[in-house]
Image (tube, rainbow, N blue to C red):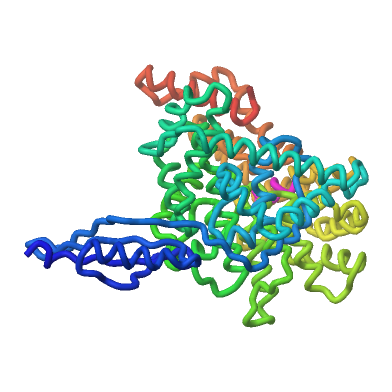
Amino acid sequence: MAAERASFEIQVMRDGRWSTETVAGDEQEARVIAKKFLANKKCEGARIVRNWTRSDGRMVENEVFSETRSVRDDGEVRIVPIDSAPDQCETPEDFYSPDGRNAVNRILRNYFEKVYITPTELMHTYKELKRVQDKDTLVPSAVDRVAGLQTRDGSKDARTRRDELFRTIDQISTRARRAETIALPKINGCFSAVLADIAGVSATEDPDFLAMVVLSRDLIDVRNWLGKLERLCTLAVAEGDPHCLSMLDGVIADVLGANVVQEILGWQPSLGQAIRRMVDLADGCMPHEKSEAGESLDMLNKLFSEGKLPVSRACLIDRVHRQIRSPNPLNRNDNSKELDEYARLIERLLLPGGFLSGPDTVEALTTRYTRMVEQGGASGRRAAIIAVMRAMPDRAAGAVYLSELARTDYAKEHAADIVAQFDLVFNARILGDLCARTLSPKDKLARATLAHRSVKSSPFPAEVRTRVADHIDAVVERYLVEEQVIEKLDHPDSHLRDRAVRLLQFCAAGILPEGKALSRARERILHLLRQPNFDAHFIDGIPDPVKAQKALRDFHHLLQRAGFG
């Protein structure tokens, strides 16, 4: 009777996914069928799942056989012609670094999408290295491309650089081959436990390298991106050691460099929306409704929101910038909505502290607009700068944009064009002209202060920085006077303690620029502090001596935060 309640599913892997092919009545028959599937050289894997029906009607599943492998594809695979490469990679460690792996990930993207492995797995698994080196002219083409990019400034001969790269690749291959002969533990628990177990395994090999070999062995048979991502995120969420978490972060970045991002995002109505969702993911707040990543998205949101994946976040932001620069329309279905999508993109990329990644973000936004104007060359770039400035949500945001643009290559040829756009800022005489009127008073002050700080720290000539910053400061000061902001905070009918705390909190909030506006608020505070017996008046009405002393201590801490230390 027990045998009748059991069946054996034979599943086959295609494109990294398992699908049931047939069902057998006993295990021996199932193994024969599985072996037949594996006899096909194009079969990625086969497994047998035993399904047993319990007496209470519940089904119990148990995997009794599984074999996966890399399928050799004799079709031609070309490199992705990347347009930038990291500085000289002199040692294997340079290739293992985040920048090195990112470059490998981009240039060999077509190959990785065929075999479902990451740069980390490639460089720590000798069989995978040998396989890619045997793949047509893939590696020589990649080396030629990188050597050309790294010598385009004329500092070194491209042929010499190519020979150096090949020698480093040989060192990586030799190191991976040696690791094959070392008996290493499997991951059974947290990743840091593996690193601890490896510490005494080899007297000559770095434990970190061997730990990555173990991780690569763990991932190599998972032939789909979501599976790898789930495995890595599970390890990262459970990891308490910062160093091990950093190692996992780099491999998660490898996976996020693949097309799995499309599965994480799910279907999006436009490229503009997809880019905004990528930024949400990098901030750890991406919604779930369209994602195919399931629990992996929950773990990613948690890890990103806690700031535990800086390398992976940088990988996502780099992808955001490349998508912004791309010629693909932000709204493929309706060209008339392109500018609306662009405006929404700016709103998402402009954060309280400035643009998402400063100069890189504004450079990408400007490059995108050069594809949206009719002119080409220098005229097109000038037209794009003017158009992007006018697309900003307000003139204060425009000042931030110009300050960051001055740090990019656009400033080499268009410095005068960038400075000329400050005329729009000078035309703003009141805060409502400088900042969007839909913002709250506090947010308007914060936006104006951000513009002031951005200009002050920009690479513009001193006279330009001073003139623009002084104008913004004057606009804010005029707002404080006309709206009687300080007088409302320092109402004479209020208790001295309430007046002083409100003014200090206002100064400490960081929403006033350093200048006349902030000085006006500070002068009012100094006037209160200079009153005779200030401390006694401050704690008047607090009968408990302990609470009175605490109120004074808190006030002095607030003084320091507000710059009265």
Image position, residue 319 (x, y; %): 64, 57
> Which of the 4 quarters of the picture holds residue 275?
bottom right
Q: Of 494 and 109, which appears nearest the observer? A: 109
Asked whether, in this view, residue 341 is left or right of residue 301, the answer is right
**Residue, x 90% and y 59% (percent of image)?**
417
**Residue, x 64% and y 37% (percent of image)?**
174
Q: Of 145 and 476, which appears nearest the observer? A: 145
**Residue, x 42% and y 64% (percent of image)?**
38
Q: Quadrant of the N terminus?
A: bottom left
- Please determine whether, in this image, residue 129 is positioned above or below residue 188: below
- Please determine whether, in this image, residue 135 is positioned above or below residue 120: below
Image position, residue 406 (x, y; %): 83, 50
Is residue 459 in the magenta section? no
Asked whether, in this view, residue 161 is left or right of residue 326, the answer is right
Image position, residue 204 (x, y; %): 58, 24
Asked whether, in this view, residue 29 is left or right of residue 55, the answer is right
Q: Which residues are magenta?
A: 444-452
Image position, residue 563 (x, y; %): 65, 28
